[in-house]
């Protein structure tokens, strides 16, 4: 049996970590912009960013590899926002921004590591066919 013929072993723990970090980031972003430290008193339209994060959630929950691939790149927008706000905001908003950075990195790392065996298997199959 060659590498191309072996089944891919997926990591349940990495998938759970991806899902949990994404859900935590959705909750953090909504709470941040609606109640905890909104840009404007009473809430801010920035809370809609939580809806953007909810967009890939169904695919991530279903382990859709295509969705997980683009979501791992999409999450970098939230990492960038977190870095900008962590270095420019003050008070609670700064702490929440660092939380956004951490959760973005956790999601990105867990998702990339989850997808790596599938990518290797696809490369092995492509090489095996040539």
Image (tube, helix red, strand yellow):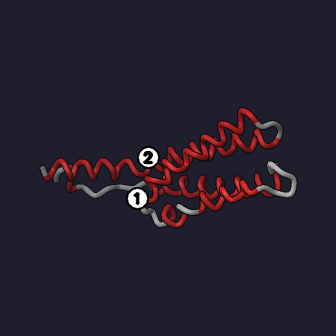
Q: Give the image location of residue 84, x and y in percent.
A: 67, 37
Q: Which residue is mark 1?
A: 66
Say whether residue 19 is left or right of residue 128: right
Point out residue 92 in the picture as x, y percentages from the top left corner.
81, 42
Q: Which residue is mark 2?
A: 113
Badge 2 vs badge 1, beta-carbon distance below 8 Å: no
- Residue extending furthest right? 41
Q: Judge the density around disc 2: few (<14), some (14-19), many (≥20) Cα neighbours within 10 Å.
A: some
Q: Residues within 10 Å of mark 1 (few under 14, many from 20)?
A: few
Q: Is 69 left, or right, of 26 in this rendering?
A: left
Task: Tell me residue 86's x, y (percent).
Answer: 71, 36
Give the structural element (helix, strand or loop) at label 1.
helix
Q: Residue at x 53, y 57 (%)?
A: 16
**Could you tell me how far apart the alpha carbons at marks 2 and 1 are, in whole angstroms?**
14 Å
Establish if 94 lies above or below 12. Answer: above
| Residue 24 falls left or right of residue 17 | right
Residue at the (21%, 53%) spot, across then down = 125
Residue at figure coordinates x 18%, y 47% from the top left: 127
Tell us which disc is closer to us: 2 or 1: 1
In the rendered view, tell whether residue 110 sits above or below residue 59: above
* Badge 2 or badge 1: first in the primary sequence: 1
SS at mark 2 in the image: helix
In the depicted structure, whether residue 44 falls above or below residue 88: below
In this view, the residue in front, 123 or 47, is 47
Q: Is residue 98 left or right of residue 20?
A: right
């Amino acid at each position: 049996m060659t590498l191309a013929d072996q089944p891919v072993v997926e990591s349940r723990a990495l998938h759970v970590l991806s899902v949990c970090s994404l859900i935590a980031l959705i909750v953090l972003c909504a709470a941040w912009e609606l109640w905890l430290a909104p840009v404007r008193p009473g809430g801010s339209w920035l809370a809609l960013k939580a809806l953007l994060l909810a967009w890939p959630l169904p695919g991530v929950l279903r382990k859709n590899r295509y969705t997980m691939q683009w979501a791992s790149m999409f999450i970098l927008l939230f990492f960038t926002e977190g870095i900008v706000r962590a270095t420019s905001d003050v008070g609670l908003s700064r702490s929440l921004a660092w939380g956004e950075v951490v959760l973005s990195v956790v999601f990105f790392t867990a998702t990339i590591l989850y997808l790596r065996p599938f990518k290797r298997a696809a490369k092995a199959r492509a090489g095996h066919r040539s």
